[in-house]
Image (cartoon, grey):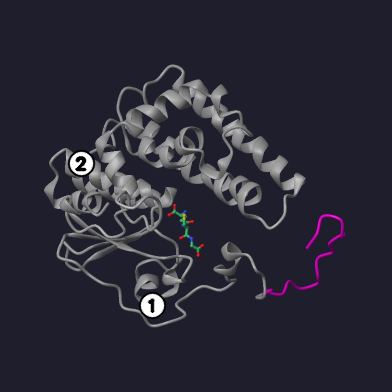
Amino acid sequence: MSNTEPYTPAKVWQWNTDTENKFSNINRPTAGAIEEKVLPKGKHPLQLYSLATPNGVKVTVMLEELLAIGKQDAEYDAYLINILEGDQFGSGFVDINPNSKIPALFDQSTSPGIRVFESGAILVYLAEKFDAFLPKEASARAECLSWLFWQMGSAPYLGGGFGHFYAYAPEKIEYCIDRFTMEVKRQLDVLDQNLSSRQFLCGDEYTIADMATYPWYGCLVIDNLYGAQEFLDVESYKHVTRWAQQIQARPAVQRGSRVNRSWGPEGESVPERHSASDFDLSKQAT
Ligand SMILES: N[C@@H](CCC(=O)N[C@@H](CS)C(=O)NCC(=O)O)C(=O)O
């Protein structure tokens, strides 16, 4: 594929399996399990199968926040799903998420157990189960769900659109980078304007909307997600930066961001988490 060769779509699209790209290689045009693989299960009420990508971090941050406010039944076992190795296509994983994407949660404290997939649905499920981080009053709840769903609808433009074409695609295609940069900068401006008069996305209260948005737009601005800080001129989004720094300073966010990480500095990552002491053990390993 090259920018200089004009591309004419075939009459019927065919799946090209001999691409060199490690990200497109894991994708396939069909759904369902491709191998029998039983998922491991721990002793805690909640079983999480995930990876520390922005969508995964939303949930580990929520679980750590719940534990931090004393919700002991939010104890969880977090197992690593290596999406580059195809773990998401194992039969056990597909049973709890037919869409083969992390994160996926299994609540074994109920009988029968409950599966939940899609990060936004998992956040709402946990918020309702533990009565936390989702306001109950009608207008505050509507505001929180609006920002949560805003994030769920917007992030694919950031990750699948901008991030993919700016950082991962085998060649830089101006049309694609322009299109998604325009949209991501517009989204950052939406957030910046909202946060200019609010401490958190919905006002004074820290909610699941902040937890969902921080790993994407917060990390884009303060952690150089996709190496795009300069390209996107993130310094101009001052309110997003202030908000992201405030959230990043929370101990539960720092713990949650380390869970299910299989990369980064040794001692920082906690690839599997089964108890609070896993964070200390991981530090001692350095
Ligand atoms: N809308 C989903 C998106 C989940 C998603 O895209 N997960 C990615 C990692 S961030 C994944 O599992 N990719 C594996 C694949 O595409 O095969 C959610 O928010 O849970």
Is 74 in front, or is 265? 265
Judged left or right of residue 191, residue 91 is left
Q: Which amino acid does label 2 sit on?
A: Asp
Q: Which of marks 2 and 1 is in front?
A: 1
Furthest residue toward bottom: 36
Instruction: Report the span colored magenta.
Output: 1-16
Q: Which residue is drawn at 66% across and 55% down?
A: 169
Q: Is mark 2 on a helix, strand or loop?
A: loop
Q: Which mark is residue 131?
A: 2
Q: Which mark is residue 91?
A: 1
- Where residue 130 appears, as percent x and y from the top left, is 19, 45
| Residue at x-position 87% and y-position 56% | 4
**286 is higher (above) or lower (below) than 144:** below
Question: Residue 84: image x %, image y %?
Answer: 48, 66
Residue at 18% from the left image edge and 44% from the top image edge: 67
Q: Horizontal placement of 68 versus 168: left or right?
A: left
Task: Say which quarter of the image contains residue 211.
Answer: top left
Helix or strand or loop: what does disc 1 sit on? helix
Residue type marked 1: Ser
Residue 194 location, x and y as percent? Answer: 47, 23
For mark 2, does the 10 Å Cα neighbourhood hold few (<14), some (14 to 19), or many (20 or more) residues? some
Look at the picture and state if 72 lies above or below 199. Answer: below
For mark 1, does the 10 Å Cα neighbourhood hold few (<14), some (14 to 19), or many (20 or more) residues? many
Above/below status of 278 relative to 207: below
Q: Is the magenta stretch mostly helix, strand or loop?
A: loop
Q: Nearer the viewer, residue 33 or 275?
A: 275
**Horizontal side, residue 196 vs residue 73: left or right:** right
Q: Is residue 123 visible?
A: no
Q: Which residue is drawn at 43% across and 69% down?
A: 88
Q: Which of marks 2 and 1 is nearer the N terminus?
A: 1
210 or 227, nearer to the observer: 227
Q: Confirm whether the magenta stretch covers residue 192.
A: no
